[in-house]
């Protein structure tokens, strides 16, 4: 079956702009998590959604937001972009909210902020 | 913060077993040990997880010490395609996200 799909794969924005990233989970998966990966900080948890409800939120400013739709697809938005927001944004889906279980990751959306 | 400690890097000869250690001395009784790996420019890939007993699947084996304070991931016959960053993660059940540390960069050498 199809894996986790993230769009767009690559994008370039300038400071002050906003960006929306999309994630389509594996069919039947109701939990979607988002992570930010940078060379300096590694993989950092952003938030998790389960059945359209945010279940967990990482330590990121309010400029980072997300939502999940009734079909489990999820979007994350970053407003007022800063240079430090340049990163690989990864989405993962699973059948459960929380563990134990396997997270299935997408290939990521690579954001460059100029 | 990650609850695990891993060596930053390791080398392994192709065809030999790769043994990746992980310390998790503060693990709680209901927390699982997970292993993921990330090949360059790809999303992390689940490998295996366990609670108390040793586990084996088609990719690897997970050996957890009796006191559960450490574990070892074993790739029985490493290939060049196993070159990746390997993450050991401790996480409980319920509503707890996985927290990734810096992992171990495994280089498989021909």
Image: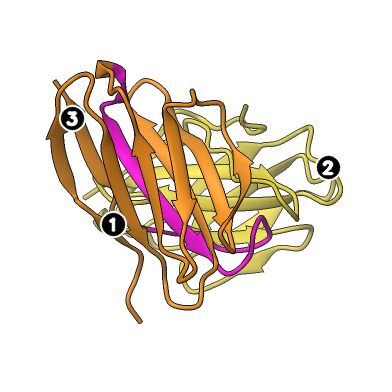
> Can residue B51 be seen from the camera position used here?
yes
| Image coordinates for residue A29, horizontal then vertical, percent | 51, 71
Mark seen at residue A6: 1
- Are discs 1 and 3 both within one chain? yes
Is tag 1's residue or tag 3's residue first in the polypeptide sequence? 1
Q: In the displayed image of the protein, which residue is found farthest to the bottom? A: A1
Q: Secondary structure at mark 3?
A: strand
Residue sitting at x 53%, y 42%? A47
Q: Secondary structure at mark 2?
A: loop
Span colored in magenta:
A84-105
Visual hue assigned to chain A: orange
The residue to which callout 3 is attached is A112
Q: CA distance from mark 2 to mark 1?
A: 34 Å
Q: Residues within 10 Å of mark 3 (few under 14, many from 20)?
A: some
Q: Secondary structure at mark 1?
A: strand
Q: CA distance from mark 2 to mark 3?
A: 39 Å
Which chain is disc 3 placed on? A
> Can residue B12 be seen from the camera position used here?
no
Mark seen at residue B28: 2
Q: Residues within 10 Å of mark 2 (few under 14, many from 20)?
A: few
Colour mode of the rendering: by chain
Q: Which chain is yellow?
A: B
Residue sitting at x 62%, y 58%? B62
Q: Residues within 10 Å of mark 1 (few under 14, many from 20)?
A: many
Which chain is disc 1 placed on? A
Which chain is disc 2 placed on? B
Say above or below: A57 vs B33: above
- Are discs 2 and 3 both within one chain? no
Q: Nearer the viewer, residue A65 or A95?
A: A65
Residue sitting at x 21%, y 50%? B110
């Amino acid at each position: 079956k199809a894996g986790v799909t993230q769009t767009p794969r690559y994008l370039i924005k300038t400071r002050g702009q906003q960006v929306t990233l999309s994630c389509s989970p594996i069919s039947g998966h109701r939990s979607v998590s988002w992570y930010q990966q940078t060379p300096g900080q590694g993989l950092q948890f952003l938030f998790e959604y389960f059945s359209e409800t945010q279940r967990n939120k990482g330590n990121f400013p309010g400029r980072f937001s997300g939502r999940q739709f009734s079909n489990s697809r999820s979007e994350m938005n970053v407003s007022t972009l800063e240079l430090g927001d340049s990163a690989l944004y990864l989405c993962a889906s699973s059948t459960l909210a929380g563990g134990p279980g396997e997270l299935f990751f997408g290939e990521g959306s690579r954001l460059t902020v100029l | 913060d990650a609850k695990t400690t891993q060596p930053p890097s390791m080398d392994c000869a192709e065809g030999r077993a790769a043994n990746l250690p992980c310390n998790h001395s503060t693990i709680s009784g209901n927390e699982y040990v997970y292993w993921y790996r990330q090949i360059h420019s790809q999303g992390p890939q689940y490998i295996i997880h366990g609670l108390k007993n040793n586990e084996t699947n088609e990719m690897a084996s997970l050996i957890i010490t009796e006191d559960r304070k450490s574990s070892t991931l074993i790739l029985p016959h490493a290939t060049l395609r196993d070159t990746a960053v390997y993450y050991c993660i401790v996480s409980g059940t319920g509503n707890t996200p996985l927290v990734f540390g810096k992992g171990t960069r495994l280089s498989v050498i021909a």
